[in-house]
Image (cartoon, rainbow, N blue to C red):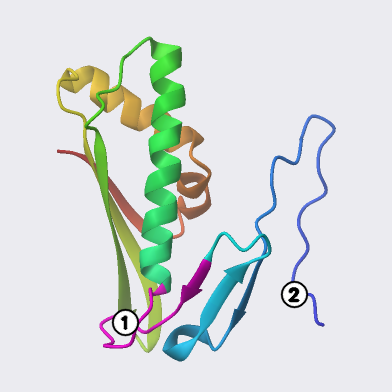
Amino acid sequence: MTELATAPAPTHSEKLVYTARTHTTGGRENGASRSSDGRLDVKLSLPGSERVGANPEQLLAAGWSACFESAMGIAARKMRISLPLDMAIDAEVDLRLADGGYFLSARLNVSLPGVAREAAQALLEAADQTCPYSKATRGNIDVAINLI
């Protein structure tokens, strides 16, 4: 097995919280991915395909929006703001093609009914600074986080 890159060495204050492990075969076209604990077992397909399965952009959208919502919860507790039970995030991840290469862009459309706009915007900004997905994509893809 060839190792392409290694993770940076942990700092003394860094603590490993969790490692997700998956095994993927077949890629986008007719693949499958299964987690080491068996909780995720998904067929993969191309975007727009008639084949059964999710595509990687859908998986990114689901993971990112779930993580962002959790980051909002942490921020809300710190700011002493109650999040509404009917809050929601509609994530959109675009697969784009230009100059012969593929790239991504994304939007997180966040609904916080009953939360004052200024407080809601502060929550979005705080979550964007702490969400690991937001950190990983910052400066790498075009992202819009919209309060709707």
Tell me if residue 141 can be seen: no
Q: Residues within 10 Å of mark 2 (few under 14, many from 20)?
A: few
Bounds of the magenta segment? 41-55
Q: Quadrant of the N terminus?
A: bottom right
Quadrant location of the C terminus? top left
Crowd around label 1: few <14 · some 14–19 · many ≥20 (10 Å): few
| Residue at 52% over, 85% down | 27
Could you tell me which residue is drawn at 85 percent across and 32 percent down?
12
Residue lying at 67% horizontally and 62% vertically, measured from the top left? 21
Q: Secondary structure at mark 2?
A: loop
Say what secondary structure mark 1 lies in: strand
Question: Does 39 appear in magenta?
Answer: no
**What amino acid type should be assigned to the residue bearing mark 2?**
Leu
Displayed quadrant of residue 113: top left
Q: Which residue is mark 1?
A: 98
**Where is 40 relative to 28, above or below?**
above
How many numbered circles does the render carry?
2
Is 51 magenta? The answer is yes
Q: Residue 4 — which label?
A: 2
User: Label 1, label 2: how many angstroms apart (C-alpha)?
Assistant: 26 Å
Q: Amino acid at mark 1?
A: Ala
Q: Is residue 2 left or right of residue 45?
A: right
Against 134, residue 12 (above or below) is: above
Going from N to C along the chain, the mark reached first, 1 or 2, is: 2
